Image (tube, grey):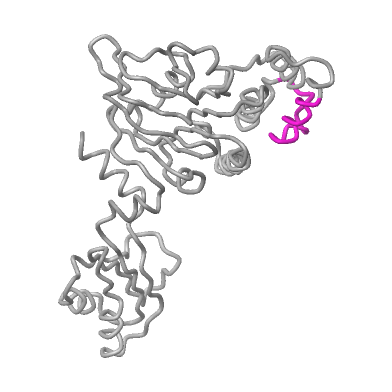
Amino acid sequence: MIEIQGLQKFYGDFQALKGLDFTINKGEILGLLGPNGAGKTTTMRILTGYLKPSFGNISVSGLNVVDDSLKIKGMIGYLPESAPLYDDMLVYDYLDYVAAMRGLVGPAKSQRIVEMVELCGLKEVISKAVHELSKGYKQRVGLAHAMMGNPEILVLDEPTSGLDPNQIVEIRQLIKEIGREKTVVFSTHILSEAEATCDRVVIINQGAVVADGPTATLLQEYGSSAVVDVVLQHPSSVQVISEFSKLAGVEKVESMADLETELVADDLVQLAVFSRREDDIRPALYQIIREQGWNLVDFHRRSESLENIFAQLTQEVS
């Protein structure tokens, strides 16, 4: 549905985008990830027609973002990082104003406002002034604004920026619900948000695409290490580390004593045993534990996290 080809953007001598190439499929929730200054917002502003590319192109359903900008804008609902709301208006009056600007009149306008109030959870604040709302509710009003014209594509720039954890969960669920019917593109640098919400992620760093795919695929492709967490009762940590370190395939053994864990008793030894992702060292570890007669409290394998992969990819090209 959306094709980004050789996209470049210069601000004077500074090149913000360095030839981006990727596609966004219809009905997909795509997360545009990257550190601050990576080029996420610039990409979104070109997609929405706010900026023109220096070189390259974005096409939406065959339309060119430069030549057919007005038509593409009619297909897109856009929520920038700071929602451009009129603080002195009541929420209902603001939505009524937005609906009118989208060309809705009469019963169709009233019905669309009702739908947006229901979808975005605005019933409790519909009669309040915008300036009275929390940041979370302001984001909800911004989403209602972006969706008022029933766009095919929803573009959200850092939609959970500045929200508290509960508000983040609420907006995340709302995005997933919207994504059942729309193509959604949103930028973030919060990795857990991308994992929980996106069908696919594109990681950008310094204006270039460094990874593209579902999170599970990225973990499989870029993850180099696996970790087995082991919690034992009573033995000497020095002895355990020594025995585990002798095993073939073990890269390192680290004490987790200084990390926050649920198990904090003084008689527990908590270790993280690292190996290559393709090596499953659990049988060998368990064999040592049985031979030594150690009391096993916890034992599980965890894969490389998306956070580690993100750090790896964005540092490698720094």
The residue drawn where x is 41% and y is 63% is: 261
Q: With respect to residue 265, does 309 lie above or below?
A: above
Residue found farthest to the top: 12
Depth order, front residue of 89/268 = 89
Left or right: 47, with 222 as reference point: right
* Magenta stretch secondary structure, dominant: helix
Residue range highlighted in magenta = 111-129
The residue drawn where x is 30% and y is 76% is: 282
Q: With respect to residue 58, does 216 lie above or below?
A: below
Residue 168: percent from the left, percent from the top?
Answer: 56, 40
Residue found farthest to the front: 62
Residue 134: percent from the left, percent from the top?
Answer: 64, 29
Residue 98: percent from the left, percent from the top?
Answer: 69, 16
- Which picture quadrant has residue 244? bottom left
The residue drawn where x is 54% and y is 12% is: 70
Q: Does the magenta stretch include residue 114?
A: yes
Residue 249: percent from the left, percent from the top?
Answer: 18, 71
Q: With respect to residue 217, does 65 lie above or below?
A: above
Depth order, front residue of 69/39 = 69
Left or right: 2, with 94 as reference point: left
